[in-house]
Image (spheres, rainbow, N blue to C red):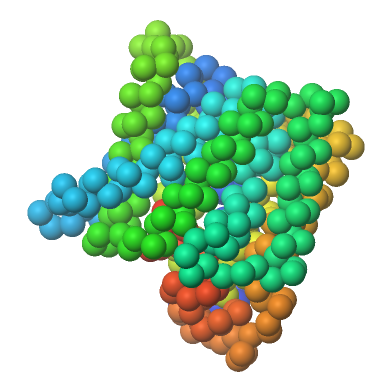
Amino acid sequence: MVGWHRVPQRVRVVGALIALYLLWGSTFLGIRLAVETVPPLTAAAARWLLAGGLLYAFVRPPGGSTWRAWGGSALLSVFLVAASNGGVTWAETRIPSGIASLGIATVAPWLVVLDALRPGGRRPTAITVAGVVLGMLGVASLADPRSPVDPVALVVLLGAAFAFAVGSTVARAVPPSGSAAAATARQMLAGGALLLALGLLGGEAPWTAHPSTTSLLALVWLALSGSLAGFTLYGWLVRSAPAAVVGTYACANPIVALALGAAVLGEPLGPRTLVAAALVVAGVGLVVLGPWLAGPPRRKVDWSADGVDGGADDGAGRGGPGRLVGGPGAPAAQAR
């Protein structure tokens, strides 16, 4: 059997990308199946508490984390886990999983807007601005009064995307205390605890629920595959491929989610949904690839070694202009 280290780097990157597309694209279906018989905030809490507990058991710093580290992670978890993933999970009790994926794809345009507004932020290129406009037009078409999409759920969904973008922007400015993996685990645990508390305050009574086997398996899938495996793959990809290549997951997720929703749940794919999907995916693609299209790489990407540097700048994945928010040094909740 050929060792993993002997597989060409390009092949490894392509394989990891396909796996990430499927893992993160399937989370919207997993959420929809979970909330069929489990209250939404309780379902979200269970997912993140399970994922965070398993991850923290492996990456717990010697002597444990400080109260200051827990406090910083808890603050970020308000945006990155509770408001974002909690909002998505609640929204999927009222809208199809594929539509939810389109709403969350607006994280990318929101990041561009917030980055331009922050002190010392970067002005977006014309291509990036075009991507933002296209993405927002796609979402606006879903908000049309003639659309069957629940307007309250759509507003909550867009609020969840905005919350994740805000949290990601803050996380970029405030490096995690200690290892990035430990910070992510703390965010998962703190966010899960907050979601559980919010669910109880909102009247959810998990002890009276009768979860189906499908819902329970969906929660396990979300915790192990969507959170832990997805985070691991994404962290490796950010270190091993150009930022523009890794960022294609944001374009692929809605496509995978729409296809799975239609195939498994029979969610309708009418003309309005397809047009909205085309606009959103095209817009996100321009946002992700905008910096690269505006300025070609300064040097050829070396795919032969682990830890490839390249893309629109030599700092891709390390905090430079091409860095993807949510990399190993940033939150991994990804709002989904």
Residue furthest bottom as drawn: 299
Count of numbered labels shown in the rendering: 0
The residue nearer to you, when weighing 9 against 273, is 273
Residue furthest top as drawn: 208
Instruction: Inspect this view and state whether residue 297 appears.
Output: yes
- For the point 67% across and 76% down, which residue is it? 292
The residue nearer to you, when weighing 123 against 110, is 123
Residue 23: x, y in percent? Answer: 56, 48
The residue nearer to you, when weighing 160 against 333, is 160
Residue 71: x, y in percent? Answer: 24, 46
Q: Quadrant of residue 82?
A: top left
Horizontal side of 264 relative to 243 (left or right) equals right
Question: Looking at the picture, does residue 4 appear above or below residue 179?
Answer: below
- For the point 57% across and 63% down, which residue is it? 116
Question: Looking at the picture, does residue 132 appear above or below residue 48?
Answer: below
Horizontal side of 208 relative to 267 (left or right) equals left
Residue 301: x, y in percent? Answer: 59, 85
Q: Quadrant of residue 112?
A: bottom right
Residue furthest right as drawn: 271
- For the point 36% across and 47% down, which residue is it? 76
Horizontal side of 224 relative to 111 (left or right) equals left
The residue nearer to you, when weighing 5 against 149, is 149
- For the point 22% across and 52% down, which residue is it? 69
Question: Looking at the picture, does residue 83 appear above or below residue 66?
Answer: above
Residue 257: x, y in percent? Answer: 68, 42
Instruction: Inspect this view and state whether residue 14 appears.
Output: no
